[in-house]
Image (cartoon, rainbow, N blue to C red):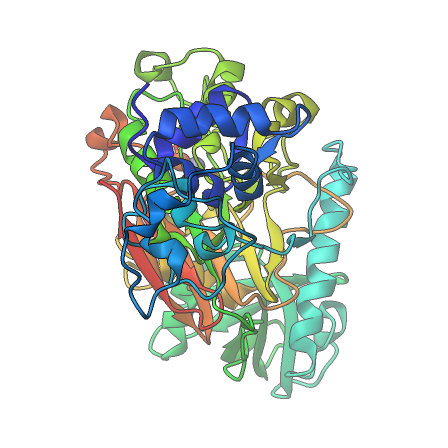
């Protein structure tokens, strides 16, 4: 059993039913005889333990017969290091006492269990995330027509509330009674956008009382804003009423938007989160080796501060997602795909807090908001004790709120909006548009399917500190009014389909977010 790398140790432990903390893995991997160290630790762990901790490994060591102190005495002590760090002879070294926090961290190749302590290895101590805006368990939608009315009414109420303070809204059914030429404003959902015979734009808004049209002249700067409009999004139009009181000549269009003054919250300690998506286990193109390199890195001292792993959908490749998909499947059974995904999660250190939401390849309803995985799938994925929540969800870690959304609407935005506003090369620009519209999937229809609920879970009520999406398999990030927006690439090499449509995915990239500064670095494991 070769056990030269931490991830191999982690996998071996996983095969024996344990998820292992990084500290435990490091202690074993750095032992002179990792295989023997692993056996000792496993034998000594309580029979009902699911997690193997550094403590278990330490205890296994302390249970060993007392060593011969003479054997260590011939190593000269270096003045600046504690004794324990200078011991190079693993088999005869004395057992380490309770964590020696004075010892420098162990990036040196400590050769025995004794050279490191649980504390110097630095076990992670993540705080359990809090989850908001999760539809799971609260879904009421049956798909009836009236429910669409309800969900759009809710969208209107909540988004118009964000705009009402900025304009003097008049309900659609009273605007026609105003005197021609008067200044007027209306807040509504975009019901229709069409060009007139002379090339101007007619934008029809709808509120709870009816609809009213606004005209945007083609030679006004405002015409560019019309290019940014999507059906069903909520905007405010300001202008003056026409002579026949039949339309508003628009002077301005306002979006709910994120205030420029928004100041994100940050963690009060140095701690990091890895943000990924689109693992696509079960696809022939799943990059297993790169995944294991990533997991290996998570076990290394360099990743010591990474205490959270957020996965924004498409855990598996799924079945029947698109025509001819069978030919590209490595694993044809959906449950087997989740079993394999669960195995891959076991490579991730057990003391990392994982949060995941489903995507359009996952085995949950396709319509959004998507509830989280059902009990059967949770059972399959239970080994790592991940937090499993709906798409979208707001996940707060260390005081930083992260809006996680898989990102199916991004395709629509990229297709509809001008290139400089949204493109596959700069997916974060499309995310900026979603923040501006304060809705993760404004346009209903097309690829984005909407499940009508009593409440529109897709509205962005509270400005998040971080916005995390995936789906388009490209990495891109930037800040919009101080909200860090990141789309996180994938773990699936280019498929034949993607080749045929010229999608060149960013494979095996892991954006690592400093939660205390909201700075980000992207690590590549290709
Ligand atoms: O989506 C990965 C990316 O590829 C996303 O931008 C959609 C695009 N894609 C994938 N399959 C199709 C089909 N059949 N038509 C159009 N666009 C597609 P993913 O969710 O991983 O499949
Ligand atoms: Fe995907
Ligand atoms: Zn997807």
- Along the line of sight, the residue nearer the viewer: 381 or 30: 30
- Along the line of sight, the residue nearer the viewer: 421 or 62: 62
Q: Residue at x 32, y 55 (%)?
A: 86
- The image shows residue 490 at horizontal and vertical percentages of 34, 40
Ligand 1 quarter of the rendering? top left
Q: Residue furthest bottom?
A: 182
Q: Is residue 495 above or below residue 71?
A: above
- Classify residue 388 as left or right of residue 299: right
Q: Is residue 281 above or below residue 179?
A: above
- Classify residue 328 as left or right of residue 54: left
Quadrant of the image occupied by residue 83: bottom left
Q: Is residue 433 above or below residue 135?
A: below
Quadrant of the image occupied by residue 514: bottom left
- The image shows residue 154 at horizontal and vertical percentages of 74, 56
- The image shows residue 360 at horizontal and vertical percentages of 49, 33
Residue 381 visible at all: no
Q: Quadrant of the N terminus?
A: top left
Q: Is residue 319 above or below residue 456?
A: above
Q: Quadrant of the C terminus?
A: top left
- Along the line of sight, the residue nearer the viewer: 404 or 92: 92
Q: Residue at x 39, y 44 (%)?
A: 299
Q: Residue at x 51, y 76 (%)?
A: 253
Residue 265 visible at all: yes
- Along the line of sight, the residue nearer the viewer: 112 or 264: 112
Q: Residue at x 51, y 30 (%)?
A: 41
């Amino acid at each position: 059993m070769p056990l030269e790398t931490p991830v191999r140790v982690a996998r071996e432990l996983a095969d024996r039913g344990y998820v292992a903390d990084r500290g435990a893995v490091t202690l074993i991997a750095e032992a002179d005889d990792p295989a023997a160290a692993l056996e000792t630790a496993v034998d000594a762990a309580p029979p009902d333990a699911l997690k193997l901790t550094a403590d278990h490994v330490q205890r296994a060591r302390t249970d060993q017969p007392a060593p011969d102190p003479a054997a260590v005495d011939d190593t000269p002590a270096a003045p600046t290091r504690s004794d324990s760090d200078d011991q190079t002879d693993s088999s005869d070294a004395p057992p380490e006492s309770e964590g020696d926090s004075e010892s420098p961290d162990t990036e040196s190749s400590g050769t025995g269990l004794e050279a490191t302590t649980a504390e110097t290895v630095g076990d992670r101590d993540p705080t359990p995330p809090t989850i908001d805006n999760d539809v799971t368990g609260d879904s009421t939608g049956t798909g009836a027509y009236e429910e669409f009315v309800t969900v759009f009414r809710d969208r209107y109420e909540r988004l118009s509330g964000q705009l009402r303070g900025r304009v003097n809204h008049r309900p659609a059914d009273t605007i026609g009674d105003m005197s021609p030429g008067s200044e007027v404003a209306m807040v509504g959902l975009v019901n229709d956008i069409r060009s007139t015979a002379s090339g101007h734009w007619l934008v029809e808004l709808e509120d709870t009382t009816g609809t009213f049209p606004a005209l945007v002249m083609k030679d006004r700067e405002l015409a560019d804003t019309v290019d940014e409009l999507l059906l069903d999004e909520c905007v405010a139009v300001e202008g003056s009423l026409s002579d026949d009181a039949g339309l508003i000549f628009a002077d301005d269009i306002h979006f709910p938007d994120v205030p420029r003054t928004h100041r994100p919250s940050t963690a009060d300690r140095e701690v990091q989160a890895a943000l990924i998506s689109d693992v696509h286990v079960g696809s022939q193109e799943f990059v297993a080796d790169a995944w294991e390199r990533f997991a290996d890195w998570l076990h290394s001292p360099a990743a010591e501060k990474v205490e959270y792993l957020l996965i924004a959908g498409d855990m598996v490749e799924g079945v029947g997602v698109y025509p001819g998909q069978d030919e590209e499947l490595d694993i044809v059974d959906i449950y087997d795909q989740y079993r394999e995904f669960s195995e891959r999660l076991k490579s991730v250190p057990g003391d990392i807090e994982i949060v995941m939401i489903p995507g359009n390849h996952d085995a949950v309803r396709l319509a959004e908001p998507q509830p989280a995985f059902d009990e059967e799938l949770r059972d399959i994925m239970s080994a790592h004790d991940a937090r499993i929540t709906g798409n979208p969800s707001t996940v707060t870690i260390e005081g930083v709120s992260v809006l996680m959304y898989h990102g199916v609407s991004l395709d629509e935005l990229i297709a509809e909006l001008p290139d400089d506003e949204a493109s596959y090369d700069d997916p974060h620009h499309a995310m900026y548009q979603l923040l501006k519209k304060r809705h993760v999937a404004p346009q209903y229809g097309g690829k984005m399917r909407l499940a009508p609920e009593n409440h529109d879970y897709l509205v962005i009520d509270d400005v998040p500190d971080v916005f995390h999406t995936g789906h388009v398999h490209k990495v891109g990030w930037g800040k919009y009014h101080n909200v860090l927006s990141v789309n996180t690439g994938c773990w699936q090499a280019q498929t034949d389909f993607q080749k045929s449509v010229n999608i060149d995915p960013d494979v095996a990239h892991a954006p690592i977010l400093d939660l205390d500064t909201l700075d980000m670095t992207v690590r590549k494991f290709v």
